[in-house]
Image (tube, rainbow, N blue to C red):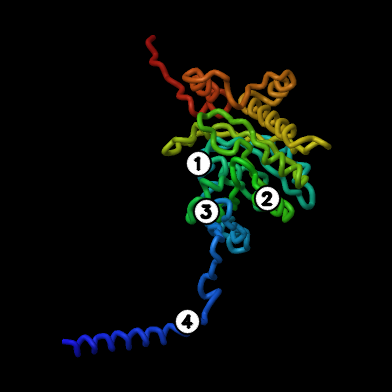
Amino acid sequence: MDRNLLRAQKATGAIEAAVKRAATPLRNFGFPYRAPTVPRGVVVPPEASGLGAHYDTEWARRPLASTVRGVITEGPIRLAARFLADPEIVGTDRLADLAALEEPPPVIFAPTHHSHLDTGLMIRSVPSAWRHDLVVAAAADYFFDKKWKATISALSLNAIPIDREVTGRKSADAMRTLIDDGYSLVIYPEGGRSPDGWGQDFKGGAAYMSAKTGAPVVPVFIDGTGAIFGKGMKRPKPGRTKVVFGSPMYPAEGESTRRFNARIEAAVTTLGDEAITDFWTARQRAAKGTSPALTGPEYTGWRRDWALAERRKLGHVGLRRRQQRRWPNLD
């Protein structure tokens, strides 16, 4: 019994020695073949995930991806916008002077945002001078939280991730570089889709980027998309929309971002009034300070919902959605 135990001990020792000899060369391989050692007391920060605001979209603007996106935007996106939203586009003549230049400058489009259809509608509606070099600022926490969503957003919409709450330095630098390279931007000043069908207060991202780059801001009002595929709706209901472009706006000398942002919001408010009335009426009410607020009435509850339903009946957009009831002839 002792001899067998001794033999087992010798065999185990031989195996350990063989493993040690085999593993000895691996000790000579350090960084980058294995992680470097970390001194005690040093906390290594976690690596960036590569998603969200850190997602790199540069690949989406290379020639092959741009060609694929051109096919997508001129095909499925334009068709979907046409059949789901049937847009009436107004005000592009206000951009004619910029579009007629030999090299139209980059601009920042600042539209209202009530639906995921808004981006496709903007791509279809923007004049051709800027349509093919258009970048969409999209919420990093929604469109870039998963790899497949980030890839689709970057490829089909030429979207870049931004923080919807605050314009971080990384996002601001990326947008400034794109404008310097000749790209135009779509920035939703409300920061996200309307939760109840009414507008939201504007954030200063578009005004800030305009002040930093010199690119003009083009206010845009989109009417009708909230009733077609608003937030919380499970499937779209085809309807009619109207896209109203305003005149390019520049920050005044010495004007703060806050005041410029207020002017942009006022311009979009006037365009919203124009969408349901006409140009002259909207300007008269703007001059008097009586334009209907984008954010709707101050009261809450069912009265606010009722007011929204009544507003959606106004203008050319509401005509198609209203059912014209035919009463029987009793004569």
Mark 3 touches mark 4? (CB < 8 Å): no
Q: Which residue is mark 3?
A: 150
**Label 2: which secondary element:** helix
Question: In this rendering, would 209 be left or right of 14?
Answer: right
Please, what is the three-letter code of the amino acid marked with disc 2? Met
Q: Nearer the viewer, residue 106 or 161?
A: 161
Judge from the rendering whether residue 230 lies leftward or rightward of residue 96; answer left or right: left
Q: Secondary structure at mark 1?
A: helix
Viewer can see residue 37:
yes
Going from N to C along the chain, the mark reached first, 4 or 2, is 4
User: Which element is circle 3 on?
Assistant: helix
Q: Amino acid at mark 1?
A: Phe
Q: Residue at x 19, y 90 (%)?
A: 3
Classed neighbour count for the residue bearing mark 2: other residues with Cα under 10 Å, few (<14), some (14–19), many (≥20): many
What is the crowding at mark 4: few (fewer than 14 residues within 10 Å), some, or many (at least 20)? few
Q: Earlier in the sequence, mark 3 or mark 4?
A: 4
Q: CA distance from mark 1 to mark 4?
A: 64 Å
Judge by depth and name the residue closer to the eye, 241 or 167.
Answer: 167
Label 2 or label 1, whichever comes before in sequence order: 1
Q: Amino acid at mark 4?
A: Leu
Image marks 3 and 2: residues in contact by CB distance under 8 Å: no
Residue identified by numbered label 4: 26
Find the distance from the CA under tag 4 to the CA under tag 2.
Answer: 46 Å
